[in-house]
Amino acid sequence: MKTVRLATALMGLILCVVLGLTAPARAAPYAAMVMDARTGEVLHSRNADTRLHPASLTKMMTLYIAFEAVRLGEIGLDTEVLISANADAEPPSHLGLRAGTTIRFRYLIRAAAIRSANDAATAIAEALEGSEAAFARRMNRTARALGMTRTTFRNAHGLTSDGHLSTARDMTILGRRLVYDYPQYYNIFSRREDDAGIATVRNTNRAVLNAYAGADGIKTGYTRAAGFNLVASAQRGQERIIATVFGGRSAAWRNQRIMELLDMGFERAPSRATVRVPPLPSYPDAPSSGGVRASGAVARSLRPIPRPAPVAPAPEPSPELLAAIGEAVGEALTEIETAAGTAPPGVPPTPRPEPQATAIVPPRPEPIAPEVVTRASSTGSRLYGVSLGRQPSHHAAERLLLRTALAELGTFDDALRRVVQRSGGYEARFAGMTEDQAARACARLSARHLACETFGP
């Protein structure tokens, strides 16, 4: 009888294995967070500090460092990157890179962000730090600087590795930093498809992008150990919400849950809030060079000697311009007083004396230096700026620039005001800024509901 029971049990076990009826592997723990991106306020959390497998959410940090490297001049978007055998050997999802070939850095960024390509993420890591292990150390340093206190990275792509863990809170923080630290690149995450050099890649997050109003990113992730993960952001009007899910049971379940969390965020977030743009991270343990590695380029070369240029007389200010300046100064000061709470609503501002033409002393003329065209070696060069759009007249453009400069004291102090005549109007520009200064200035203006656009070489 005992032998019969043993045989029956053995037969049942065999049938379970053959028919796939054995108990499924334990599902990954579920964790979630919802944040008001404008302020960083947490609106909902569940197991948000539990260390879990992030899967391809890891590539958010890989891309953050890629954007940082471009900003610091370590690499250019059109730099050709040599593909290693290590990158070639990465398992799917991949772009299809082949060892010994080269590809532009911008295409690696697109493939990692949109297709979630593992080979592209590894190629980014090796291009910036020489090896994936060295890049992982940089990832961890950056995570600490961003306040991601419970995250440890072991690779650039997110495939399961011992000790490679993060949390819903940390990944939400990272998603917010991508929005505000690199707004000039953030739109990559909303592209449904794009050219990645050797192939057209389609977005792994397009289901949410297509189904949810206002959704514009950010990143999906999946491994068997992690389950279905997603960090998503959406903007409606002036409100922006970031939601994170770890451990989804399926892609469809994860997508439905993330949309429910975004709905929760928009319901709980105030309609108006002051945008608190975080400062860029600082690295106390970084080398004095600011993290920019030697490129091997010639450190010094001969430059053409500019010829002396004639001195151009300073134009006399017109009475109309003087009146516009007085009006703009008054309006800007009124805005500043109102924002500071010193001017009660409905009370007209204190009249400002209008400047008199006779009291204006034109500045001493300075020589106009000839423009010498050189190659921009990094995005730190002052070849960028912010455009405020076109105005119907030169006078209106000058007035807009002056009002903006006075209302944003400290933001445009070192910028040059330019009015450029275009078809259909006069474009008001702040020029002579670095790429980072222009991006952050435009972000500040956008937070005040003012239209702007960055431009560069």
Image: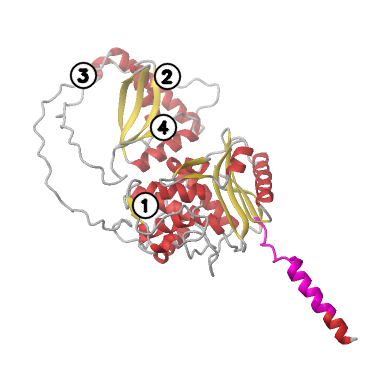
Q: Nearer the viewer, mark 3 or mark 4?
A: 4
Residue ID for mark 4:
453
Kind of residue sitting beneath label 3: Pro
> Counting other residues with Cα less than 10 Å from the Cα at mark 3, is it few (<14), some (14-19), or many (20 or more)?
few
Disc 2 from disc 1: Cα separation: 50 Å
Residue ID for mark 2:
351
Which quadrant of the structure image shows residue 424? top left
Disc 4 from disc 1: Cα separation: 22 Å
Residue at 50% x, 41% y is 193
Q: Which region of the structure is painted magenta?
A: 8-31
Image location of residue 163, percent across then percent down = 54, 69
Q: Nearer the viewer, mark 4 or mark 2?
A: 4
Residue 22 drawn in magenta: yes
Judged from the image, the secondary structure of the residue bearing numbered disc 3 is loop
Residue ID for mark 3:
315
Judged from the image, the secondary structure of the residue bearing numbered disc 4 is strand
Q: Is residue 428 left or right of residue 119?
A: left
> Counting other residues with Cα less than 10 Å from the Cα at mark 4, is it few (<14), some (14-19), or many (20 or more)?
some
The reply to whether callout 4 and callout 1 are in contact (CB within 8 Å) is no
